[in-house]
Image: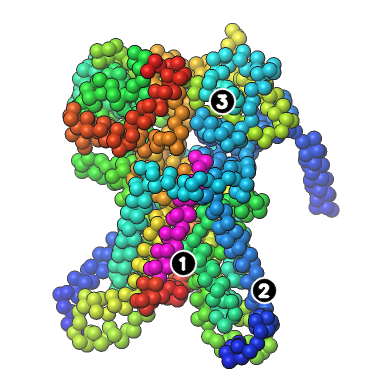
Amino acid sequence: MVKSKNDLIFNILVYAIMLFVLLVTLIPVLFVVSMSFTPYAELIKNNGFVLIPRSFTLYAYEEMLQDGKLVHSMGITIRVTIIGTLANLIVTLLTAYPLSRRAMPGQKMLMRLIIFTMVFSAGTVPTYLVVKNLGLLNTPEALYVPSMINVFNLIIMKAFFEGLPDELFEAARIDGASEFGVLVRIVMPMSLPILMTIGMYYAVAHWNTYTAAILYINKANLYPLQVVLRDKIRATNANVLSEEVVPPETMKMAAVCFATAPIVVVYPFIQKYFVKGTLAGAVKG
Amino acid sequence: MKRIVSLLLMLAMMLSIISVASFAVAEEPVTLFCVIGKHAGGIPASRDDDFVYTTILDRTGVAVILDDLQDYYNALGNRIAGGEIPDLMYVSPDYAQQLASQGLLRDISDMKETATWQHIMATYGEDIDIPSNYYGEEMICIPAAMALGDYYYEIYTRADWNEKYGLKNPTTIDELYEYCKWIRDNDPDGNGVADTIGFTCWGLTGLCAITAPYDVAFGNYLLIRDGKVTNTLLQPRMLEALETVKKFYSEGLIDPGMFVNSESKATTFSGKVGVVAMPWSNMDKAKYTEQYKEVTPEAQYLPIEAFDAGEGPRYTLAAHDIYVGDKMVVSADITDEKYEALLKVLDYMCTEEGEMLVYMGLEGRHWEKDANGEIVQIKENAAETNYTHEYQWMGRNDARYLALKFPEAAHSVEWGLRYNPLEYFNSSVVIDPDDYDLPTMEDYVKTQLIAFFKGDRELSEAEYGKFMDELYNIYDFQTYMDIATKQLVDQGLANE
Amino acid sequence: MTSAPVSHLGHISRWERFRRAFVRWWPMYLMLIPGIIYFLTFKYAPMTGLVMAFKKFNVKKGIWASPWVEPWYKYYQQFFGSPANTRIIGNTIRLSLWKLAMGMFPSLIFAIAVAECKRRWFARIVQTISYLPHFFSWAVVYGICLAMLNQRNGVVNTVIRKLGGEIIPFMTSNKYFPGVLVGSDLWKGLGWGAIVYLAAIMNIDTSLYEAATVDGCGRFGQIWHITLPGIRKVFVVLLITKVGNILDAGFNQVYIMMTDEVRMSGEIIDTWVYTQGIGKLNFSLGTAVGLFKSIISCGLVFFTNALARKWDSALW
């Protein structure tokens, strides 16, 4: 096989693109990390950013942890992420599984009604009133109950179940297993990748939850991580308040690193699951 | 055996804790729920660490549950939409009017019959009882003495450079121009790189250091001249002011980062700026001084007099009515019991102890009296008091407060009060959004003025006239001026 | 597995059909209960609250007791009469279209590059890392943007300054802010967006490539003649979905990143509805505009889906 000049160019192009994406993704993250370890004085002095800080300091982190608010809010976020993800997964599974059975009367209508909620939303205030009437305001539950099922995730899971071979169900039925038995003993073990994937989606959504928090949480000591983080990052003296002390840039970056570290730590362990699951979902969806 | 004993001990301890806790719950204090959006130090995460809360509870038997909300007005609006209205809310005057128009606020005029009112007037001054506290006949805002934020702005130069290079502080705009040029060209920080900047300031408000001498500020500001309502945009020397700023800007004498407050501060702290127009609260607080001294140990910023452009020196913008500002309002749903409790708390805040508590903290821990009976801050614990202003419901006597709380900035605080301000009347006018879209107009004005002096838009009489035409024709400027004029005349501030 | 034969359906009563379905499927219906309750409570019940758009909502009276507005379209009049509306709608559509373009093509190119990369370990590493930003919150991305683009300490401006250029106020100028929004969206979604294309590429029959090679088709040719046609369907479906959601320009992102300086260029319908409707207590106005947006979006989605059906790639 003769390699033409064109193919050589093609290969160079492919690697150039890959390298470009790699650098563009990594460099900003590395800068943020390195900035959080740079002494603030050095940052100001150099009239801008320094590539490699001449000295290394944990000052920004100490200052940030001293405040206590970020750590406190992370505790709330961790709790909501764990409980919320489990609840989401169970309810989504219980809904997606029956809906994957096209023969079930009413399946089509239900699916339509569910998809309709994706394109037509009732708006913020009416939804807020419902949440309020249920007594969920200012409770951690407000952060996951109103978003119990994500329709996208539901569709992906349903598509996955539809892809399971019919013979499986037939065989189980002949053995006399109940529908719940089939779900728990046969379907669930086979759906581990998709459950992991959807679980990951939900977990990340909870970790990053922001809108629900500013809507339904009105108590400073119940704010989740992202709300406190955004406030820290945005802190600039907009109004002249004599008491205000604005955190230095390095501390903002320390807060960013602190809030992201758990995701980056967990990420390598679960990424092989979700890539598989997402690919499966993407094809079907 | 040991293990069992220790287990029993722990059990006993836990039981006693539980019994104490339940006992505390039994005599529940009256609770006032209160929201604020001031946000600076922030209230301690745990209520037990909040010494203002515990002291008020101890002295008055009232538990004041304060929440500083993120994203304040949106969060508050949300709560109001759901009917979860806090007992007390800290809001701006026009927001208070809007709440009152929906019948959400309690008329607190009956407070005037109480002894508490006498105490408030005695402690915080009679002049805090102003018209904007009222909605029609109803009094809706707890009167407050406001912070003098407008007077925090200072013009600083580098005293150490003046001394080292024999420079004289500029007193006129022309001298300022020469001064900035010298700073730009002569590398006063001696690092061999031409990176020094003549002038930076705290956004367009800080730019008043250059524009106020022309009787002009960049933005939509209502002025009264010879009893007539006018606007900075209509001022005779507007074009002159724009040309001056443009000259400074185009020659690189003004820091291009000045539009963003945090940027201009960082530029200043890098020790490369000659003249800085900035609130002292961003320069002279111990924490900030520490920051810039770390970069440039010899740096010394001292406030100077305002500049003159033919009409006498002038600096800063100041609202005509400094007592217009965010105030505490009371929910209409508040029970009589809670209302009584509120009066009790206000009364306590009028005592010397209470006033000092929300100013400075606790006697003996955060402040003490020296031999002459003067109040002195205890430096080591000062950081703990960085949130007490959240409890300053009736404001504060700012000149006294600032000198006490920020002794390191006393010189600048005093200096700021000396500037001759450009007095504007925007805050005395209430614009109903149904009548006029003010934010859109103000956005437009700001962007166009900036475009003029940055050179994005040609600066000439004709082009400025065209800009004003746009303002009248597209943004309905006349409607705004008519509304404003009528209100100011009605208040007796202007004749026409 | 199948329900009663179709021919019987005409003869049995409706009730009988329900009964049979229930007997056969009751465990399934049981499972559905939590989900149905969820959708009814949090999605359908609030829809009744939309009448607020036609009432002068008074907090004390609640939705139902609040009086109707005169005329019923008052809030629409107010919205369309204000000079803000063209700007906000314009911002929304412009931002959406840019995000659409920047969300689809770079991901497509990246996906092809990954698929064509012969060193699999390298491809896998790049792929894995490129997904990472998708998991960052917007608050974090905002922090990263500040680190990179700030006028003073930002990396980009530091480099520009070192090279002697004039610094660019990315985060605070109306000229650049939309670009920052689009750029950060691209950065966050580039790798993740490639997944769906990659899945489609993997589904292409490899024998097609072998045949092409035999025919003397170069690598560029293979992309043009095999890969691109192979993922056309996915591409069109995605495109249509995104066009349907054109009025959603990303509330979270804009809300978190927007400051007052860039409100002119950054304000979109969703953020406006939120700040006007809730922050400034114009609940009815906010709901009215939200309803308007929902109806238009809904119409768009159904229209585009019909279009997609025509292209033989219906969404559902």
Residue C303 lies in the magenta-colored region:
yes
Residue B81 lies in the magenta-colored region:
no
In the image, what residue type sits under mark 2? Leu
Q: Is residue A170 something one can see in this rendering? A: no
Report the chain holding disc 1: A
Tag 3: Cα neighbours inside 10 Å, few (<14), some, or many (≥20)? few
Residue depicted at x 63% and y 71%: C32
Q: Position of residue B495 (x, y in %)?
A: 39, 15
In the image, what residue type sits under mark 1? Gln
Say yes or no: labels 1 and 3 on the same chain: no
Say yes or no: labels 1 and 2 on the same chain: no
Tell me whether the residue at label 1 lies in contact with that at label 2, contact meaning CB atoms closer than 8 angstroms: no
Query: What residue would you read off at disc 1?
Result: A271
Seen from the viewer's position, the closer of residues A205 and B367 is A205
Query: What residue would you read off at disc 2?
Result: C30
Q: Position of residue B84 (x, y in %)?
A: 63, 42
Q: CA distance from mark 1 to mark 3?
A: 63 Å
Report the chain holding disc 2: C
Seen from the viewer's position, the closer of residues C74 and B188 is C74
Q: Quadrant of residue B475?
A: top left
Label 1: state its secondary structure. helix
